[in-house]
Amino acid sequence: MIIATAVLVALGIVLAAPLDAGARLRELLHPAAETEPRPTATGFLRRGGRAPDARTDRLWAIAAVENCAHLLKVGMTPQAVIVTLSRQNDALAPIARAIGLGEEPGRAIAAHSTDLPGPAAEVLSGMAAVWTVSERSGAPAAEMILRYAAAQRDALDAERERRIAMAGPKSTVRVLSWLPLIGIGLGLLIGVRPLELITGLPGQLSIGAGLALYVLGRWWMRTMMRRAQR
């Protein structure tokens, strides 16, 4: 009985613990620049490889947009800019070829960025739209693209802040969800016999109502957290 109780309590504690407390703590204590180094044009999709997650995809794409803007600022032509970036990232080679054949930069980027992972394609498609608007309006493309990159990085930082802010509530939800299991183990320690309680009609009704409320509570909390993250 003591062994079973210890197992139940230990299992409840393990299930209630955060999934990656160490990573969460590092993210809270250090800025994003330290925990997640900004990728450069040499780090992502090199030799056609893929980044491990959506956040890395977006980080690379934003860095590529920033590099593009800086190269345009120093006087390089759009074709030279994309060719320079494509030498470091094979995934950008189709865009460089299209621009070399005379296609407008905005159209070329929009048409060929769809082959990239979703988050990177979204960022580069936005840059293509900004570039097209700047060419048609006569505005400086480099400045507009750089502002677009800054807005994208701000949005990514805001998403990170929301994720950090939701870490506490998520841990609380996990602990509260597994408290019943821990409670059974603690009940065994003080001499309560759960099996005798659940064999009767009141116990079965209590279990049914508890399970229904448990499922409803989980759904309610998940819904609130999803809305808070928007």
Image: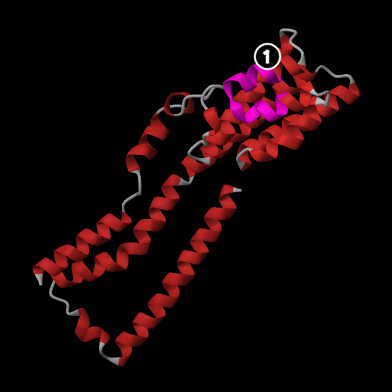
Q: Residue at x 70, y 16 (%)?
A: 81
Q: Position of residue 25 (x, y in %)?
A: 36, 36
Looking at the image, residue 31 sits to the left or right of residue 93; the answer is left
Q: Quadrant of residue 77?
A: top right
Q: Quadrant of residue 131?
A: top right
Looking at the image, residue 70 sits to the left or right of residue 129; the answer is left
Q: Dot 1 corresponds to which residue?
A: 70
**Amino acid on which the number 1 mark rests in the picture:** His
- Please state the extent of the stretch shown in magenta in the rendering: 82-96
How was the colour assigned to the protein in this rendering?
secondary structure
Residue 15, compared with residue 118, is above or below; it is: below
Looking at the image, residue 79 sits to the left or right of residue 59; the answer is right
Q: Main secondary structure of the magenta part?
A: helix
Q: Position of residue 78 (x, y in %)?
A: 76, 18
Q: Residue at x 53, y 37 (%)?
A: 55
Taking the magenta stretch, the answer to whether it contains residue 93 is: yes
Taking the magenta stretch, the answer to whether it contains residue 102 is: no
Q: Position of residue 177 (x, y in %)?
A: 37, 63
